[in-house]
Image (cartoon, rainbow, N blue to C red):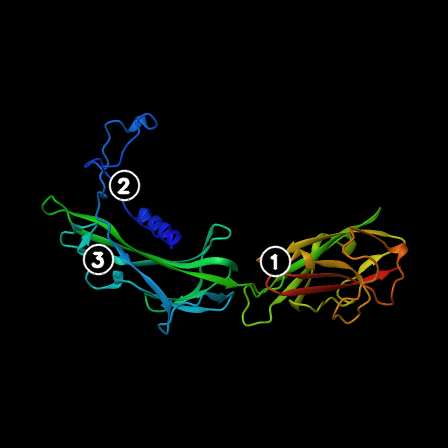
Amino acid sequence: MNKLKVVAFAAVVMFGSMVSAQEPSGAPVNLEKTPWLKGVEISPYPTDLTPTLPLKIFLENGEAIPATVTEDVPLILVADTTIFDDDPPTHANDQEIPNPRWDASTAVSWYFVDWEKNQNFNASVTQGLAANQMIVIPTTPTGKGAVTCHMARRLRYDAPEPGRSKVSFANSSGGVDVRVLDITPPLCGLEIDVENGKSGSFWPVEFPPDKYPLPKTANVYFGGGLFNAADREVVVEGLELGANMIISADQMVVNVSADDKLSIRVIGGDNYKLDNAKLKFGICNNAAGGEPIPVGPINEEIIDLANLEMPDNPHIFVDATDTSGNRQVLFVPLKVK
């Protein structure tokens, strides 16, 4: 909860005003370390009155937000705060606000906080509902995170000088700790170099991004001279992203000679955490997908084709699993001359 308080404090600072040198704060000052503060007195109150209002977040049905939510699955969230009331607050930091009145509608921002990466993300949202509601889509998986909401509403009140007024902001912030479950398979491809020959690479891209409901789908991109795509990219569209991604021979093949040496490297990764212990790549004899049956070495950076007994219909494959158990297996036909 301390971290949420830090986020809320940041919102107050953003919408608040600078403090003035009017009243001593009572905090001790070490003039040896901060000589520029000699003779400076800082008020414990902001020059402009900036009330901070409590805010609670819950689901549309009034229930608490679950500790674990699912990536790309929409949630209708409600923010409960008096910032939407017809009557504005009358006090700020125990100070009375003279003749307060709202001067604008409320600005609302929703965020996901990823404590693991120490990053904030604007929550992916669709259309708004009521002013205090939002359909929020968590698109960033994390094992330790939070959904937060920050609001600010412009406030006008009477200034000490007769006939004049001042403008400030009321702020309202809150948050709930959540874990966002990863449901997207890895997006791994291969970079292939033929010794004394051409090179190329292929990699999948989730399309459309953040698709829900399942299954996820992806386009596979091919580039490099090995795929006759030295100055362009060839795209195979609409594969189901998962454990049976098969490129057919009429879509793309890896053309090699029987005595070639292939240098292979994995490219890509996962939108959360890849399980490197389960990562596999190499050559297999599967013609119709399914569980890869390797031919020759696994996870070798260099494969000497002359040392392999090739099956009738070989494929190069990459098999990747993330720490949430989502799996991707991609097969590309291998044509040996």
Which residue is the site of mark 1? 270
Residue 258 showing in the rendered view: no
What kind of element bears circle 2?
A: loop
Residue at figure coordinates x 47%, y 51% from the top left = 119
Which residue is the site of mark 2? 18
Question: Looking at the image, how many numbered discs can be counted on the residues?
Answer: 3
* Residue sitting at the far bottom: 61
- The kind of residue on which mark 3 rests is Trp
User: Residue 330: horizontal and vertical position, in percent?
Assistant: 71, 64
- The kind of residue on which mark 1 rests is Asp
- How many neighbours does mark 1 have within 10 angstroms: few (below 14), some (14-19), or many (20 or more)? some
User: Residue 23: horizontal and vertical position, in percent?
Assistant: 19, 37
Q: Check if mark 1's residue and mark 3's residue have beta carbons within 8 Å.
A: no
Classify residue 204 by image quadrant. bottom right
- Between the residue at mark 2 and the residue at mark 1, the CA separation in whole angstroms equals 44 Å
- Quadrant (top left/top right/bottom left/bottom right) for the C terminus: bottom right
Which residue is the site of mark 3? 102
| Residue 133 - label | none
Residue at figure coordinates x 77%, y 72% from the top left = 288
- Between the residue at mark 1 and the residue at mark 3, the CA separation in whole angstroms equals 47 Å
Residue at figure coordinates x 75%, y 58% from the top left = 281
| Mark found first going from the N terminus, 2 or 1 | 2
Disc 2 or disc 1, which is closer to the eye? 1
What kind of element bears circle 3?
A: strand
The relative height of residue 159 versus residue 185 in the rendered view (above or below) is: above
What kind of element bears circle 1?
A: loop
